Each structure stands twice: as C-alpha cells, then as structure tokens.
Amino acid sequence: MILSCQNIWKSFGAETILRSVSFHIEDHEKAAIVGINGAGKTTLLRIITGESKPDEGSVTISKGKTLGYLKQHQDIASDATIYSEMMSVKQDLLDMEQRLREMESSMKDAKTGTLEEIMDSYSRLSSEFDRRNGYAVRSEVTGILKGLGFDESEFDKKISSLSGGQRTRVALGKLLLTSPDILLLDEPINHLDLSSIAWLEGYLQNYTGAVVIVAHDRYFLNRIVTKIIEIDRGAAATFEGDYTAYSQKKAMMREIQWKAYLNQQEEIRHQEAVIAKLRSFNREKSIRRAESREKMLEKMEVLEKPSEEKADMHLKLTPRVLSGNDVLTVRDLAKSYSGTCLFSNLDFSIKRGEKVAVIGDNGTGKTTILKILNGLVQPDQGDFTLGSKVQVGYYDQEHQVLHMDKTLVEEISDTYPEMTGTQIRNLLAAFLFTGDDVYKRIRDLSGGERGRLSLARLMLSEANFLILDEPTNHLDIVSKEILEEAIRNYTGTVLYVSHDRYFINQTATRILELKHQTLINYIGNYDYYLEKNQELSRLAAKDEPSAEVLPSPPSQSREEWLRMKEAQAKERKRRNEILKTENEISSLEERDKEIDGLLALEEVFTDLEQCTALMEEKAKISEKLSSLYEYWEQLSEEE
C-alpha cells in the first residue's frame, strides 16, 4: 500500500462535503475518483497533497515515496520558453552533464596523479548520469511535448504568451518528467485533442508509479484505471474494475437497494395495518400483541431511500417542425488565418436524422466550421445551404450566446417573453438552479453552470438542427449521460464537435475527421472510426492500396482457403460461446427473480436463517452475472 486515506471528514460552513471517506491505493495501481460536480473530488485531492486540512481523519503516504499533483487550473508565471521550462525539471541532470564536460576539458592538461583522480570521479559521475537516463533527457522532453500536442516550431514560445490550456499542458509535461511515485491528476485531458489523449493513455498505462485520476471522460477511464472510488453524498465506495464494470455494479446495487427498500416499506405498512387491526379488537391480548409489534417496528433499522437515478437534470430535445430531408449542403468551403490554411475545398452534406461528429486535432478548424455555419465567421471561399424548414439551435462552448450581465431569469424571460415566472423557475429547477440561484449574474456562474443554462436555452429553442461545440465540457458524468440519452432520442439532426470519445461512441451515426486541411468521412461511431483508422494506417505503412478498391482475386491459394476455414471455425466457436453465455445469464437472472419473490414472503423474511441464505445466494448470483456480462461483451466485441 502506497497511499491510505482513513476516515476523512471535511465541511465548509454548515455543508459537509466528505463523510468518513476511507480507501487505499496500492503501488503501481491506477485508480479514478468519480462523482457529480461539487461532490468533493478536488477537495479530496487537495487534502491528500496537504493543501487543505481535513476536519477529521488522516492521509498516510508510504515512507520515502514522492507525490506529484496536476491542478485543474494552472497559471505558470514564467518568462522562459516552453522547452527551457520543461528542461528546468531536469536541471540536476543538466548540471551533472556540465560537470562531465568540465572534467573532460580538465583531463587534457592534468598530470598523471591528478588525471587518475579526475578519471575516477568522471567514471562514477558518468555511471550515475547514465543510470538516471541523462543521455536521453532531451529526447524525453521532446517526446513528451510532442505527445501533448506541441509542435517543434512552438518550443521557443514564451510561457507568458500561452493560453490557459497551453500552460496546463506544460504543467502536465513537467509533472510527467518528474516521475513521482504517486501521480494525482485533476481533469488532465481538458485541454488535449484526441491524438494527445491517446498518447497520454499509452503513457499512463505504462507508468510504473501509482496514478489517481479525477476525470469525466469515461472512455479514458476505461482504458487506464482498474479501480473506481465513488464519492456520493459525501461518502466513498470502492469498486474494482474499469468505469464500465463500476457502472454495471452500481446499477445492480441500486436495483438491490431499491428492492430492499420497497420490501421493507411494504413490511412496515403491513405491520402497521396489523397493529391497527389488533387495536381495533380492543381486547387486552390483542393490544399486547399490537404493542409487541410496535416495539419490533421501533427497533427496525429503517433503510434510507436510494437517490433517484439521473434525477439531477431533466433534458428533452423536441423539434417544433419537421425539416426537409436535405438539412445542410456545404460546397468548396475554405478558411485561413494569418496566412495559415485551416481547410480548403470542403464538400459535405447532412441528411435529416443524422448525428454527425466532427473530430480532429486542436487548431485544425473544427470550431471555425461551426462558426461559419452560424454566421459568426465568414469563409474565404465557398458557401453552404440550409434545407427546407431547417431551424438551427447553437450551443457555443465559450457560451458567447449568453449575456453575462443578465440574471438567469432575465436570460430566459428576455429570450422567451411568453413564459411565465413560474414556468421559468420550473425550467431552471430542472437544470439544478433553485432558490436564489435564479437571480445570479451569468458572469458569476461556473463553467458547468453556464453549460447547463445553455442546454436549457437549447431545449427551449425547439430547433430541428442542433449545432453543438464541445457540449460535454464542464459536465459531470451523470449530466453527460442525460445529454447522451436526449440526443439519442432526438428526432432532429445534430452536427457537433467533441473530444469526448465515449459521448461520440454513444451518439454519432457518422464521423467527419478534419485532417490535412480536408474532411475524411466514416459512417459509424467512434469505435468504427478507430477500427477503420487503424486499418488505413496499416495499409499506408505497407504502402498498399485499400482492399476495398481492389477487385477480389479470381481464385484462392490453399493457404488462403485454410485461413478462411480457420476463421469460420473460430467464428462458429465464438457464436456458440455467446449462446451458452446468454443461456447461463438467463438462468441466473430467472433465479434472481425467484429469490426476490421469496424474500417478499412473510414466512421467508421473518426467518433469519432462510433469509440470510437467500441473500448470500443472491450476492453470489450478482457476482457471477457481473463476470458473465463482461465475458459476453468481450465475445461480442470480437465480431
């Protein structure tokens, strides 16, 4: 064990943020802390680093172990260049290298006795320099900077001239260079593009130390972590596995908790009815029996009602009118800034009902395309046409469509004057703005709060063509899932830019990748894009044309025939295994329902021994089902 948190309590004023939070991290383990916005995730990280003190509890770090922390917001104050700022992390190695050069120079004029002494010192220092990988320090710095999305032409830029996102990337690079034993990362991918996120995934997967991440990117978490620490209403619960495994276990636990709660409530109502009936007999014996049952009820440990799933935000996107089949047609679109061409000769069209995601590296012009379509930026050449009855709803990641000096109520009432005060309050409450929150100035809202307000405006627009720029930025995981469900159920058309691969996977029917100043079309979700992109990369590496454009050979060699038969046999085996697994799942689910029925019977739930045996069997079924679900997914993904 390298890190332990025991019984952590933290309050701010009357509000308790963390309640008896306990967990531990093993050496080399990769873990994530998840929870809704405001749950206390960042507060917990600050307590671990010592930036904040807990009201109660303790944090223990193994003796001699180092800890590195990436804050969510960085403000590096430096006049150094990006490259020199990174190299400053390895200053001790640079000093060591300088001493080696000085020794080499002094050897030329040294006398025999002195030379042997210098050579002995040189040998020891050189071995230490080599052991600490000093000869590769410059290539390591270059590799990390390129991995985080910096081009070599940017290495000489001053830190003072960088944006907040670029400074955060530099801070992340410096932290990775220090290679601490425990790496704490608070939203590390907020300012990374898809290729940089993929690079960071690979880096963290191979990282030899322990990693604790706070992130809302479920795709990222699935690829890295093996443990989830959930903060829910101040309490912590630990789940082994990735985010998908956690989500499935959480759903099963919720179902068990709800059934247990409802069964107990039914039992309470039953006992109360029996007590009332016994008292109505108005006989001494009946009254004693009633009092006995009342004492039993008083001693009962009443289960807390589980929180409503996804009760935080209510979002339903409904078009007012049906658009024509041709929603958007773009012809020969081009745009350059300061002599740098972002894209040229872009031609694409979008049909009614499509959900199209635009992806690509930072700075390629994705947001510029959306701004052109919304009339906020003029193209250098080309044009676009909106189809019949198309009504556009625009979500801007910078929320420039919001009026910063207005209150939330004014923002909605000025845009939709036909709405009553009660209707506006009900709408804002559906997006978590209650009480005096509705009179806050928009400039005083957090990024997540502005995002929710923009979604509220979007819902009211009743548009049939939604254009969204990074709609999941600043949203917690639950809010993202609600938005995903709303878009999947939306009958209109969607065009959006996003770096959230899980969100893209759940919502996109088509992907347009902006690369090398043009668009590449993929008909499918993110997993499909990834598969085809890797296939194209392999073909390009072999300098072979795509198999899709080549005619099939007229005949097959014996080796090809054998490979085909082997693949067919493997596929039959996979399908049989899927069928077998599905039958086993069905059987266990049926037994699980039988147990629920038995637990609802009075003669069972009043029999402690029988009830305990059934609950133990139910727990084993739950554990077995979890592994079967995971195995079924693995088999299905092999298709």
Image: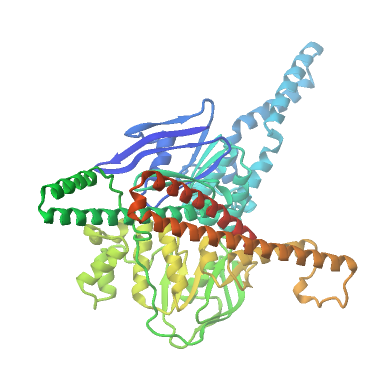
- Residue at the spot x=67%, y=38% of the render? 137
Position of the C terminus, as image quadrant, is bottom right
Horizontal and vertical percent for residue 498?
Answer: 51, 64
- Residue at the spot x=67%, y=66% of the render? 532
Instruction: Please tell me in which quadrant of the rendered image residue 323 appears.
Output: bottom left
Query: How was the colour assigned to the protein in this rendering?
Result: rainbow
Foreground residue among 19 and 513: 19
Asked if residue 430 is positioned above or below residue 261 in the image, the reply reads below
Asked if residue 469 is positioned above or below residue 207 in the image, the reply reads below
Asked if residue 126 is positioned above or below residue 486 in the image, the reply reads above
Horizontal and vertical percent for residue 365?
Answer: 55, 67
- Residue at the spot x=63%, y=61% of the render? 580
Q: Is residue 141 left or right of residue 350?
A: right
Instruction: Please tell me in which quadrant of the rendered image residue 564 appears.
Output: bottom right
Q: Is residue 210 left or right of residue 396?
A: right
| Any part of residue 406 in sight | no
Foreground residue among 287 and 458: 287
Horizontal and vertical percent for residue 152?
Answer: 64, 51
| Any part of residue 387 in sight | yes
Horizontal and vertical percent for residue 77?
Answer: 46, 42
As drawn, which residue projects farthest toward the top?
113
Foreground residue among 615 and 200: 615
Instruction: Please tell me in which quadrant of the rendered image residue 17 appears.
Output: top left
Q: Is residue 61 left or right of residue 435?
A: right
Total marks in image: 0
